[in-house]
Amino acid sequence: MLDSRQVTASAPGKTILFGEHSVVYGKPAIAAAVDKRAYVTLKKREDNLTHVSVGDLGVSGFLDLKNRTIKLVTGSPFQRGILEYIMRSLLKAETEGSMDVDVRLDIPIGAGLGSSAAITVATIMAAASFNQIKLTNETISNLAHQVELDVQGAASPIDTTLSTYGGVIYLSKNPQKLTKLQINNELPIVIGYTSTRGNTGELVEGVRQKREARPEIINPILDSMEAVANGARQALLNGDHKTIGLLMNINQGLLDALGVNTEDLSKMVFTARDNGAMGSKLTGAGGGGSMIAYCPGKVEEVVSSINQFENAFQINVAHEGVRLE
Ligand code: MEV
């Protein structure tokens, strides 16, 4: 019976391994989907309302899909943003309303793991399936990127691509070409994150201004980041631990030179290295947020040393992207 329909879809978060910031200037980046997922369940409601609850965030509200308005019931105005992604995702999948949307996250909030993209991708798949529409991954990925553009104004396709397809991708923004890297060996990666978050828009703008003021200094840094990402691609394919670690450390130095590092990130970066990581760097926009450490044989030591003063956990590559549960 149609009215008892219930659909759950899930999609993984992501982490950037190499190339944040330089990717904005057409340089390559490498990113991986991670085994922390967003789960979105849709259930038919008998009234004419669409209710959303993101339990882990304490956010809930009603969506009016016809008039495209949101009524926040619990949560801060800042957290309302997540309801915007969900509303636009439901609309992209041609949903008309009358449903309960429940979002469950095992992606830690504020760890820079692309939770909004994972929620967006999972919502689009769940809603399409709920509406008995079959979407290809390519369509889901494109629609999700559109949602991010609509909500954020600007977005790279990295997050939505990884949440859709899973795996490890090499991305060159100019032209926007994504190549899936066949990496079969495990990547022993630890994520560490602080509660302070950087503002991506401001950080990207800060780099732009530096480059405009001093192109003769900043352009060679971006060129070096390109060489780092290309070297890392080969090292990852070869399972060359030493080179992967070395290139992460160089990338961290270059990101610091762009002004997006912080003392808190540095502390985690050096703690990881002191406890056996072969390399470590900030990941994502910087200015707070997260770092990654490459830790063959030393995952537990690195996790527990960072956990003394911040939050850390191990991640694995999620080879499977969006799926129906
Ligand atoms: C943020 O996760 C990554 C940046 O390179 C911005 C972007 O690519 O959109 C800083």
Image (cartoon, grey):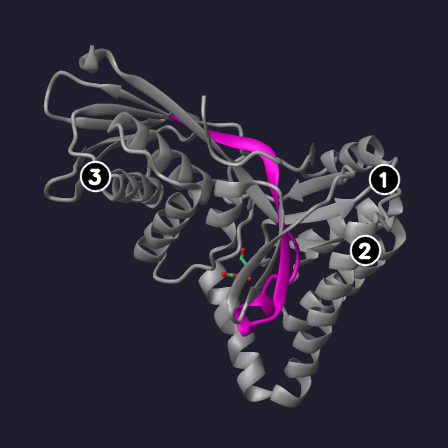
Q: Which residue is mark 1?
A: 296
Task: Classify mark 1: helix, strand or loop.
Answer: loop
Q: Residues within 10 Å of mark 3 (few under 14, many from 20)?
A: some
Q: Quadrant of the N terminus?
A: top left
Q: Is residue 40 above or below residue 173?
A: above
Position of 222 compared to 56: left or right? Answer: right
Q: Which residue is mark 3?
A: 94
What residue is rendered at 46% in x and 48% in y?
160
Of the numbered discs 2 and 3, the one sitting upstream in the chain is: 3
Nearest the viewer among 71 and 267 is 71
| Residue range highlighted in magenta | 16-40
Q: Position of residue 218 (x, y in %)?
A: 65, 81
Foreground tag (1 vs 2): 2
Nearest the viewer among 240 and 84 is 240
Q: What type of secondary structure mainly makes up the magenta span? A: strand
Residue 265 numbered mark, or none = none
Nearest the viewer among 222 and 310 is 222
Q: Is residue 4 magenta?
A: no
Foreground tag (1 vs 3): 3
Whole-angstrom CA distance, mark 2 to mark 3, is 43 Å
Residue 267 in view in this figure: yes
Whole-angstrom CA distance, mark 1 to mark 3, is 46 Å
Residue 111 in view in this figure: no
Residue type pointed to by label 2: Ala
Dot 1 beta carbon under 8 Å from ligand 1: no
Q: Quadrant of residue 262?
A: bottom right
Q: Position of residue 131 (x, y in %)?
A: 24, 29
Q: Which residue is mark 2?
A: 235
